[in-house]
Image (cartoon, rainbow, N blue to C red):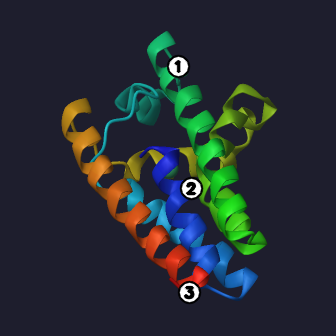
Amino acid sequence: MLVIVHALVGGLLGEKIHSIPLIIISSLVLHFLMDIIPHYDANFDKKRFLTTGEAILNKRAKIFFITDHIIALIIIAALYQMFDSKRLLIGAFVALVPDIVGLGYKTKLRGNRYYMKFLKFHSKIQRHTTFKKSMISQGIIIFFLVCIYLIIYRQQLGI
Ligand SMILES: [Zn+2]
């Protein structure tokens, strides 16, 4: 799932929930639930990773990963500007954590049994579909999320 979607969902939870521990828990749970929605992941060969623990990122996957994260960060910064809410910031960032943790694969963490167990769990729950279908379904999800943000923003402004 695009981290753009995760950031939008997490930010919304942060904006709407008042307790920080609850924001953290719900952002993480929603992250995993969103990953179940069939999507396209350029990340790596899932089958190979689940059987051998070997994750190989190709150039296309790296570009996809970096672009997705940069856009997500811009969106988070823009939402923070609009809503001036630290809770929104916390929700959005926590929602990214399960994916960012994946970068640890490049470090010594790779030798940690629990870390690898988490990565395999995270990989196993992903449901996949084609790039085209994925962009359409995620586009629709993003559209609805943006609509919800705009409604909340207008309510706050009292329009
Ligand atoms: Zn994920």
Q: Amino acid at mark 3?
A: Gly
Q: Can residue 56 be seen here?
A: no
Say how many tags the image has. 3
Distance (Cα) linking label 2 and label 3: 25 Å
Disc on res. 7:
2
Q: Nearer the viewer, residue 26 or 121?
A: 26
- Residue 147: quadrant of the picture: bottom left
Among numbered discs 1 and 2, the one appearing first in the sequence:
2
Q: Residue furthest front?
A: 159
**Depth-wise, is mark 2 or mark 3 nearer the camera?**
3
Residue 25: percent from left, percent from top: 63, 76
SS of the residue at dot 3? loop
What residue is drawn where x is 27% and y is 54%?
Answer: 140
Q: Is residue 83 above or below residue 128?
A: below
Judging by the rendered image, the residue that carries numbered circle 3 is 158
Give the residue number, with chain letter if any, for mark 1.
63
> Looking at numbered disc 1 in the image, what kind of residue is underneath it?
Ile
Graded by Cα atoms within 10 Å as few (under 14), some (14 to 19) or many (20 or more), the crowding at tag 1 reads: few
Local SS, label 1: helix
Sooner in the amino-acid sequence: mark 3 or mark 1: 1
Circle nearer the viewer, 3 or 1: 3
Would you identify the image quadrant in which residue 128 lies? top left
* Among the two numbered marks 2 and 3 on one chain, the one whose residue lies closer to the N terminus: 2
Q: Is residue 158 above or below residue 52?
A: below
